[in-house]
Image (spheres, helix red, strand yellow):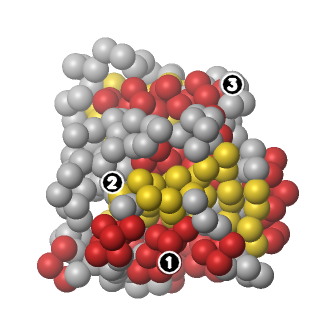
Amino acid sequence: MKAVRQHEFGGPEVLRYEDAPIPELKSGEVRVRVKAAGINPPDWYLRDGYKMLPPEWRPPVPFPVILGTDISGVVEAVASDVKDFSIGDEVFSMVRFPSFGDSAAYAEYVTVPAAEVALKPASVDHIHAAAAPMALMTAWQFLVELGHDHPNPLQPEMHRSVPLDGKTVLVNGAAGGVGHFAVQVAKLKGARVIAVASGKHESFLRALGADEFIDYTKTPPEDVTHDIDLVVDAVGGPATARFLPTLKRGGALFPIFPLGFSGADEAEKLGVTVSATQVRSNGPQLAELGKLIEAGTIRVGIDSIYPLADAQKAHERAAAGHIQGKIVLTVG
């Protein structure tokens, strides 16, 4: 098969479109002929060698490695012990995250544990289906239902969502993959949503239901917001702490990328809960979210589309930033 592999860590230039073995089907798995693959931040974290992690946290990576988790495609083989899927089924999945193996998304074929697979909504094309799994499940697992029992290694307690009905939720980085889904999920659950992004994304976010929009290039959102019930910071990192004063006592701050957060003492003084989780693959949960996409309740934003052979260009697009929705690779 054709796949995008890397043989060393580095920038987009290390991605090679080349021949690779078709992955062997194992017990409990289906093999999918991939039609589209979504791109997510963990893809470039792995590509560059997990530089954002402390050295002792960096997992060993056996080269060559194929990147990617999000796929949509057609089942072409089924292990004998799998009963819920059949050859010819159109499916989508977030494959094996947060672990990775010898089969991944940037390829013509991928093997997937059946428990991580969902039937693709019939009215949704492969591009939009492949764009959804990681980003939408991240928003859902942060805001609605965790869907797993794995604690975040960065905090002692399990992440818990907070009631959203009638509350004010600020989403920072609202136009990106997780952000544009977080806006919609919060609205679905009855929140008033303030979306923070650059000005060119305003019409996109208002169309998704944002009640208020802040162009961070003109106005720092922390200077003009207060008494917020929940901040979802889809950008995350060390700058997340700047949102603590915007929250009311009893409010919550959910950094999607919590590494580098240093405001724990301030949060305690302000009576603010800071919590995060790491998204986990969950086929049944993805199936339920697929129904929301099919009904038009959740819309999948597409920033740009590239053929698999141009994965390097897709990663260069991601590195340029200001993404509106998701970047997708088409396969075959």
Residue 14 position in % (x across, y down): 45, 80
Q: Position of residue 322 (x, y in %)?
A: 68, 73
Q: Nearer the viewer, residue 38 or 291?
A: 291
Q: Amino acid at mark 1?
A: Arg
Tell me whether circle 2 and circle 1 mark residues in contact (CB < 8 Å).
no
Residue lying at 19% horizontally and 74% vertically, measured from the top left = 57
Of the residues tagged 2 and 3, which is closer to the observer?
Answer: 2
How many angstroms separate mark 1 from mark 3 (CA)?
37 Å
Give the residue displayed 33% in from the left and 54% down from the top: 277
| Element type at mark 3 | loop
| Residue extending farthest top | 83
Q: Is residue 299 left or right of residue 282?
A: right
Q: Quadrant of residue 225?
A: bottom right
The residue to which callout 3 is attached is 295
Percent position (x, y) of residue 208? 75, 46
Vertical placement of 158 versus 46: above or below? above
Is tag 2's residue or tag 3's residue first in the polypeptide sequence? Answer: 2
Disc 1 crowd rating (10 Å Cα; few below 14, some 14-19, many 20+) is few
On the image, numbered disc 1 is attached to which residue?
A: 242
Could one spot residue 39 in this view of the protein?
Answer: no
In this view, the mark in front (2 or 1): 1
State the residue in front, 312 or 226: 226
**Which residue occupies the foreground of this view, 315 or 309?**
315
Amino acid bearing label 3:
Ala
- Tell which circle, 2 or 1, labels the residue nearer the N-terminal end: 1
Q: Where 275 sits versus 214, above or below? A: above
Question: Eyeballing the image, is 263 above or below 113?
Answer: below
Residue 283, relative to residue 109: is it above or below?
A: above
Q: Residue at x 33, y 79 (%)?
A: 262
Decide if residue 217 is on the left or right side of residue 119: right
Kindly identify which residue carries mark 2. 277
Q: CA distance from mark 2 to mark 1?
A: 20 Å
